[in-house]
Amino acid sequence: RPWRATILTLYPEMFPGPLGASLSGSALARGDWVCEARDIREHGLGRHRNVDDNPAGGGAGMVLRCDVLAAAIDAATGPDDARPRLLMSPRGRPLTQVRVRALSAGEGAVIVCGRFEGVDERVIAGRGLEEVSIGDYVLSGGEIAAITLVDACVRLLPGVMGKAASGDEESFEGGRLEYPHYTRPRDWEGRTIPDVLTGGDHGAIRAWRRAESERITAERRPDLMGKPRG
Ligand code: ADE
């Protein structure tokens, strides 16, 4: 069965968006995964299909109604649907490669894209939504965050990227950033490829790459150095 991304959004036209191109696009065309964008507004109230209202307690912005979002979630999921339900939000737990691996290995995800100032808190508990952030900055909505999460998952599906992604050499796999890469020409504007990489000693190449990974990680992401390498 294909990996299934069900995305609840007020902007369904944003999907598949960039996921329709490149590797994820080919995988989508092959049927390796499904991108199902559902318009929350179909469950909006009244003639104007209202989905939001003023925040209780006052303040700026609008809040997505819990009843409207719950109806959209219920219509998009069956009682036998075991997929995790995620709410893209800067308040969420930061997305990690470990979580991406777990999501990718499952059946898919139901992804709610927040807009406005927020989502009524009651629907988060009431429908078991798990808030996920893609980083400490604020996007104008969850859609681009959802695209990011789905891209990270889809590239790990069997046969989508081949051995480059399945390998454990890439950044974050093993808790380290990747070593530097080079290809021809050997000499470019006076900058040359490190001799070890062209010397044919594969043990020495492995050792050099490991040392470079450590050096770059310590320099750029000291926060990763204290963590287990799994
Ligand atoms: N929506 C707005 N900002 C976001 C972020 N950083 N991560 C996930 N969803 C978001």
Image (cartoon, rainbow, N blue to C red):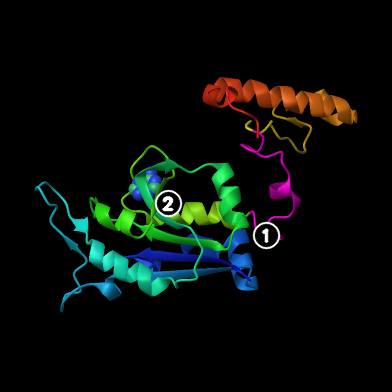
Question: Residue 99: x, y in percent?
Answer: 55, 46
**Dividing the image into 4 quarters, which one contains the C terminus?**
top right
Say which mark, if any, is on residue 45: none
- Horizontally, is 124 left or right of 161 in the view? left
Q: Residues within 10 Å of mark 2 (few under 14, many from 20)?
A: many
Question: Residue 144: x, y in percent?
Answer: 41, 54
Amino acid bearing label 1: Val
Identify residue for label 2: 145
When the figure is inspected, residue 59 is found, relative to residue 10, above or below; the finding is: above
Q: Where are the magenta residues, as a range?
A: 156-174
- Residue placed most toward the observer, 88 or 106: 106
Label whose residue precedes the other's in the sequence (2 or 1): 2
When the figure is inspected, residue 109 is found, relative to residue 29, above or below; the finding is: above
Say which mark, if any, is on residue 160: 1
Amino acid bearing label 2: Ala
Q: Main secondary structure of the magenta part?
A: loop
Q: Is residue 166 magenta?
A: yes
